[in-house]
Image: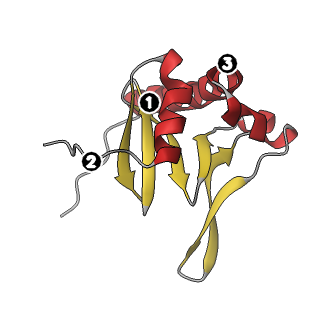
Amino acid sequence: MRSTAPLDPFVAHCVELMAPLGSVRSKRMFGGHGLYLDEHFIAILTHERLYLKTDADTQPRFEAAGCEPFVYDGGGKRVQMGFWTVPPEALESPALMTPWARLALQAALAKAKARAGAPPRPRTR
């Protein structure tokens, strides 16, 4: 059963920014929200910040634009995940967000393809 509660205004704004690329949905997670584009996990929203999925091919574009990585404290250690903020101007319109969201989708699709070609993981009990 899906919640009918209204979206947080920032989450709703981010969903709207990415809507031209496909079906976008949000899911509460990590004390924030995750965004899915056509069922591919592409973004984390937390503390009023949007972090898009990156990989080795796309991360340099985010770094070159002065974006920041998603980092959290994991058991006393700083843990960096493969998600980066977008340039501030990308939050202004769908047209400015589109190239960044496409990079996130590219990273998500590459990860899905790698998983599909990987041998099955052994089951543990």
Which mark is on residue 81?
Answer: none
Badges 2 and 1: C-beta atoms under 8 Å apart?
no
The image shows residue 43, relative to residue 70, as above or below, that is above
Residue with the mark numbered 3? 95
Q: Residue at x 71, y 24 (%)?
A: 96
Q: Kindly indicate the quadrant of the structure image that contains residue 124.
A: bottom left
The image shows residue 43, relative to residue 116, as above or below, that is below
Badges 1 and 3: C-beta atoms under 8 Å apart?
no
Q: Position of residue 50 (x, y in %)?
A: 60, 46
Report the amino acid beneath label 1: Ala
| Color scheme of the displayed model | secondary structure
Q: Residue at x 36, y 36 (%)?
A: 119
Q: Residue furthest left?
A: 1
**Which quarter shows the C terminus?**
bottom left
For the residues labelled 2 and 3, the Cα–Cα distance comes to 28 Å
**Between 48 and 123, which is closer to the camera in this rendering?**
48
Side of 112 relative to 50 (left or right): left
Q: Residue at x 62, y 77 (%)?
A: 77
Q: Position of residue 104 (x, y in %)?
A: 59, 31
Side of 78 relative to 105 (left or right): right
Q: Position of residue 98 (x, y in %)?
A: 64, 21
Report the amino acid beneath label 3: Ala
Side of 4 relative to 90 (left or right): left
Report the amino acid beneath label 2: Ala
**Between 78 and 21, which is closer to the camera in this rendering?**
21
* Res 53 seen here: yes
The first of marks 1 and 3 along the sequence is: 3
Residue with the mark numbered 1? 112
* Res 57 seen here: no
Which is in the foreground here, disc 1 or disc 3? 3
**Which quarter shows the N terminus?**
top left
Residue with the mark numbered 2? 5
